[in-house]
Image (cartoon, coloured by chain):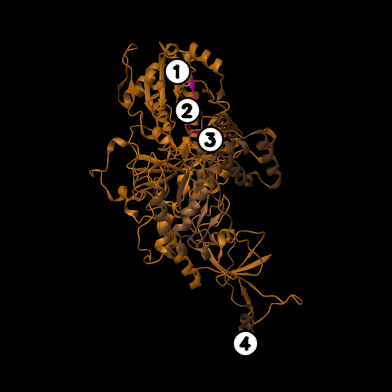
Amino acid sequence: MAEIVIDGIPYSFEGKPKLLDFILSKNKDVPFFCYHPSMSAPANCRMCMVKVGQYVKNRETGDYELDDQGERRIRWFPKLQTSCNMDMMDDMIVHTHETDDLVKRAHKDTLEMILINHPLDCPICDQAGECPLQIQTYKYGPEGSRFEVKKQHKPKHVQLGPRVTLDAERCINCTRCTRFTDEISQSHQLTITRRGDKNHPTTAPGTVFDDPYSMNTIDLCPVGALTSTDFRFKARVWEMNQTPGLDITNGKGVNVDLWTRDNVVLRITPRHNPHVNEYWMTDKGRDAIHLYNEQRLSTPAIRLHPNDSSLVMTSWDNAYQTTQEIVESTDTKQILVLGSPYASVEENGAWMQFSESILKQSPSYTTHIEKESGDDFLLVDDQAPNTYGCELLGLKKRTKAAFKKAVAEAKVILSLHDDYIERGWLSEEEIKGKTWIYFGTNHTQMAKAATLTIPITCAVEHTASYVNVDQRIQRTYPAKETKYTNRRLDLEMSEGRLDRFGTKFDHWVNEDHKVDCKPLWEIVGDLSLLWGHTLSYRHGRDVLDALASNIPALEGVTYQAMDDQRGILLTSSETQEASS
Amino acid sequence: MSQKSSDNGASLSQNGTSAYTFTKEQLAEIEVLKTKYPEVQAVTLPVLWMAQDTFGHVDPEVQRLVAYTLDLPESHVHGVAEFYTQYFKTPKGKHVLDVCTCLSCHLCGGMDTLGYLENKLGIKAGETTPDGEFTLQEAECLGACGYAPMMQITNDVYVNHLTPEKVDQVLDQLASGDTPDFESIPMPLVSTTSNNEAAGGSDE
């Protein structure tokens, strides 16, 4: 076992870790900009300087040489070293800025150099508040600058691609973005152009930065140079809540952070999970903000007459009773119940129980797989987030032909989430004359064609779990309030500055951002009461506990365990290898 | 990523129909160059030179040709071409005059030389004469501080100790189709004996 002394404290280590990685893993701080744990370390920001030396050993005897005081003699490296690309060796002595004034001075001078051409307009910069340059300048920077002449001006608001806007002046040329396109997404679309004080990242002339992972460079950018075309100047970071969640736009189950303000999801950024997505996510996953905020079904709606062109709002009680009337007046053989891979394990589970106890049948589902749309990174063919969850619960899978046949034979259809019309599986003609009760989140074409729509909570409004394509079960947290939830009472919800100190009469609060919808397990609980059953679930946890005690694969699966292990792999690794 | 590389390939073949092409001989030469370096990326520099010698410049269209020929990302070739001032990213005149205005030359009259050339050619630094003969550029240090003020002719020969007369002479020479000869200027050396004595003295 090799040993290293950092700031006078000895640590033992194995292998050849990089020094910066190791120091950070010991909860010590070393400032850096260009280093990123999953990319190469070019050491071009020169910020992570440390003083490194080695104990001098007598070559013949192998003993440590001692100085006059009897201390081991240290041979310091001639200059300060960048710790990000420094391999650790046995008998190394490291002084960080905590114990060495020279290192402190180096940080100061490096920052003064970086800031020479960096605009000092943090108050109007989009990155302020989450800016490594701002934070590190505050912690390690000089009090002022000796640079008193005009700064170099570079192009501003350059549209690099459809989703990324560059402000070249703010760029400190850390090359994280170009390394991302070279090493991670491998589209090689970005490069650093010009030289000296005029350099900045750009695409080759005549090409656009349309990489399907392009927006990761925005998160990587340690300054406000690369910004999201969609999100820039929309909100300050300190006004938003950050809630962990999942990307539900495909089956990969990418871990994300949802940034909300006044119950609107303003942006989605990736959350580190080494088992699923590392630090990255797709651009498509970030577009889900529109799914969560816009075109939401709010308050049940009903088509009063089959020939009416639109649905009218109705009360929850009326919606429930209409459902009961429709179901009771129909032979159960003519009722079709459809689960959905777009809905969570809990929703499908509660749906299945409701269907089996009251409608005397098991729901079926259809998969939504678009061949060739995946790559071997984060895009997958499976467009739905919970296909394996449906399989796990034992829902019957129907092919397109079987599904169309079942719909044609049924008179009353209760369906969840899926938009069969948009997918091209059903036409509006085929639905005509049928009583379709749609439990969904958005004003999809399905909702427009339905007889009765009942709004349910979406992935950012409830706690529920999803099983991804690798059969890892992960869960979401509520990030947006509905009309029936309250941040202050629900301890799972985060509370931002505006939520904590504002009132609902403040001008920045809009009650309309809260959607009038309920979790599906509550709805089926209320519905089953009408038949005298009691399926009382108040929380996703109740459903999951009930499922875990019934389904062997879910044994021991709890929210706590999912949180602790960053999702639980439901199959052992051997069976997974066999299936792949 | 399989999907991406195929996308890339499609766009490259599109660029294959560029206004510029390498001849068969040049392509063979590029193949030889490739064997000299461990990675293809390194061949970017000599191939850009070859392109500049052939077409007179490496504008985006030429950069695309180089990227296509070497099967490298366009952005890489663009970044390399933009980094070096010796690669001409826009078409230039027949002769490119790089007048050094960095510190040593500046102190010895580099700006005067530049001003003289601007007046004489009737263009500003960075411009090309209407007849396409001369492009005048301001250059950073070219490493000839001992012979200041100086200029470089089309990435090639240095002309040193510039005076208005010498500039006139050089321009005439260039206009008549000649290039100035390389001048060997010996550096003034301190006498070796006195140097030895001084060194010996301090040692004792």
Residue located beneath label 1 in the image: A413
Chain of the residue displaying label 1: A
Where disc 4 sits, the SS reads helix
Q: Amino acid at mark 3?
A: Leu
A538 or B86: nearer the eye? Answer: B86
Check the picture and name the quadrant holding the N terminus of chain A. Answer: bottom right
| Chain letter, colour orange in render | A
Instruction: For label 2, count other residues whose C-alpha is less than 10 Å away and answer few (under 14), some (14-19) or many (20+).
Output: many
Q: Nearer the viewer, residue A269 or B65?
A: B65
Query: In 3D space, how far apart are the residues under numbered discs 2 and 1 (Cα atoms)?
Result: 13 Å
Q: Which residues are magenta?
A: A337-344
User: Which mark, residue A547?
Assistant: 3
In the rendered image, residue B109, in percent from the top left (x then y), is placed at: 43, 62
Left or right of B199 on screen, residue B149: left
Type of residue at label 2?
Trp
Q: Earlier in the sequence, mark 2 or mark 3?
A: 2
Q: Chain of mark 3?
A: A
Mark pair 1, 3: CA separation: 25 Å
Report the residue that reaches farthest toward the bottom.
B204
In-front residue for pair B147/A12 = B147
Q: Which residue is at 35% across, 21% downward?
A: A321
In the rendered image, residue A208, in percent from the top left (x then y), is placed at 47, 36
Q: Position of residue A370 (x, y in %)?
A: 55, 26
**Label 4 – label 3 distance at C-alpha:** 95 Å
- Which chain is painted in brown? B
Marks 2,4: beta carbons within 8 A: no
Question: Which kind of residue does numbered mark 1 sit on?
Answer: Ile
Indicate the secondary structure of the residue bearing disc 3: helix
- Chain-order first, disc 2 or disc 1: 2
Instruction: Give the numbered dot on residue A351.
Output: 2
Q: Nearer the viewer, mark 4 or mark 3?
A: 4
Amino acid found under the numbered disc labelled 4: Gly
